[in-house]
Amino acid sequence: MSRELLVVQRARESFRTGKTKPLENRVQQLKSLLLFITERRSDITDAVKRDLGKSALGTELFETLGLEGEINLAIEKLAEWEAPRPVEKSLLTISDEVYIQPEPLGLVLIIGAWNYPWAITLQPLVGAIAAGNAAVIKPSEVSSHSAKVMKELLPQYLDKDLYPVVTGGALETQELLKQRFDHIFYTGSSGVGKLVMAAAAPHLTPVTLELGGKSPCYIDKDCDIPVACRRITWGKFVNCGQTCIAPDFILCEPSIQSRVVEEIKKCIKEFYTDNPETFEDYGRIINQRHFRRIMALMEGSTVAVGGTSDESQCYIAPTVLKDVTGESKVMKEEIFGPLLPIITVSGVDEAIQFMNEREKPLVIYVFSHDNKLIKRVIAETSSGALLANDCLVHYTVSALPFGGVGNSGMGCYHGRHSFDQLSHLRSCLIKQLKMEGVNSMRYPPHTAKKLGW
Ligand code: NAD
C-alpha cells in the first residue's frame, strides 16, 4: 500500500469517528493552529526567507497576519456559521420547520502553491477545520523549506490523523489524486487545475480551483497618475511579482505612457532603493526554471525601467516594458514575475474590448476619478474581482468571496465563504404527523372539487 493511500485512509477513518463534529473540538484545533503560528513564527519566516528571499516582516505582513485574522474570525463566528439557517417557507410548508443545516463534507484534499506558501496552504485549512472536515495537506514542493517545516512542525500542534501533511511534487500529488476525497481545494496554475478537475471527475468530487491569469490594469488619463502608479508599483512588485492577483499589465492612452513610466520608476526607487538586488524588502524569483521563463518573456519588448538580472541569485530587477502589443511574447502567458508591460489603447472602449477578447482574469484593476467609468468597466467585463484605485487589498476583506471565474478558477473562500465552500448546505424540512386534512388536495384522485376549482 502506498504511503499516500495509508495517510488518506487514516484521515478518513479518523473523520468517521465523529471527532470533528463537536464545535469545541474544531475551536480547539483552530486555537492549536494559531498557537503553531505564534510559537513557530521564526521557523516560518526563516523558511520563507530561504524559499523566496523575503524579509521576516514581509512574511508577517503578507502571510501570517491575514492567516491569524482568518483563524480568529472563524473561532469567533463558528457557532453562528454552523447554526441552522431558517429560510422563507411556501404556503404548503407554512407550519413546518424549514432550514439549512451546514454539515461537514468529509475528507478534503488541499493542494498548495509556492508563492505565499503558508497563507495559500493554511487558509483553506482554516475553512476545512471550521466546517468539521478532515484534510490532507499537500504544500508545494517548489517552496521546499516551507514544506519541510510544515511537515515537521504542524503535526506537533494539530491532530496528526485528521490533518496529515504529505510532501512531494507532481508524482505524489497524482498518487493522492487517485484516492477518493469529498472535496479538492487546489491553488496553482490553470494547466494543472485541469488535471486536478479531471482526476476528481471519476469520483464526482467537487473542486475549488484557485488559479491565475493575466489581471489587467487600466489607468484613465484623468486620474491622479502619481498616486495610481504608487499603488500599482506596490501591487506589482511585492514578492517580485509572484502574486496571483498582481496587476499583470497596464492599459493606458499613448499620451500618458511616458508619465506612467516616470512615476513607476520613481516609486521603484523609493520602495526598493537604487539597488533592489541588495535591498532586503525585494526578494528573489523562486527558482532558476522560473527565472529563465520570466527572462524569456522579455524578448522582443522595449525595456523602459530595470531589465537587469543575475541568474546565480535568481534576481530580476523591477522592470517596466513599454509599447508592448497584444501579440508580444510577454502577453502570451501569466507573467508571475517582476515585469510590467504597458500597452497603449485609444481609451476605455478599447481597454474593455482588449479585456473581453481574453480569458476572464482573477482581478481587473481600474484607476480613475470617474465613478461612471468605473461602473461601466464593472458592467461590461467579467473577472474574479474588480478593484478601483488600489491593488490587492480586496484580499484582506474576509467578507468578500475570494476566487476566480472561468479560466481564473471556480469556487471561492475567505471568512464565512471558506466555511460554506467546505460544507454541505443541507436542506432540512420537518413536518408533524398531524393536520393531514390540509394535505388531501395533493393526493389522487385529483378532482376539481377537491382543488376548489
Ligand atoms: P506549483 O508548481 O507549486 O503547483 C501547485 C501545486 O500543484 C503544487 O502543490 C504541485 O505539487 C502540484 N502539481 C504541479 N504539477 C502537478 C501535476 N502535473 N499533477 C499534479 N499536481 C501537480 O504552483 P504553480 O502552479 O507554479 O503556481 C503558480 C500559479 O498559481 C500561478 O498561475 C498563480 O496565479 C496561481 N496562484 C493562484 C492563487 C489564487 O489564489 N487564485 C494563489 C497563488 C497562486
Image (cartoon, rainbow, N blue to C red):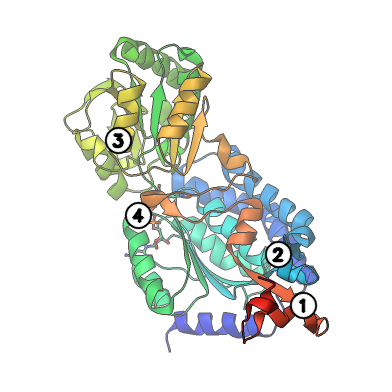
Q: What residue would you read off at disc 2?
A: 90
Q: Amino acid at mark 4?
A: Ser
2 or 1: mark nearer the eye: 1
Task: Mark 4 and ligand 1: say if the CB distance to the nearest ligand atom is below 8 Å.
Answer: yes
SS label for mark 2? loop
Q: Is residue 163 left or right of residue 290?
A: right
SS label for mark 3? strand
Q: Is residue 357 above or below residue 302?
A: below
Asked if the residue at tag 1 contacts the one at tag 2, i.e. Cβ–Cβ closer than 8 Å, the answer is: no
Q: Is residue 276 left or right of residue 136?
A: left
In x, y percent, where is residue 156?
66, 69
Q: Amino acid at mark 1?
A: Val
> Hey, which residue is sitting farthest right in the picture?
434
Asked if the residue at tag 1 contacts the one at tag 3, i.e. Cβ–Cβ closer than 8 Å, the answer is: no
**Quadrant of the rendered image containing residue 252:** top left
Q: Residue at x 28, y 18 (%)?
A: 346
Q: How far apart are the alpha carbons under marks 2 and 3?
A: 68 Å
Count of numbered circles in the view = 4
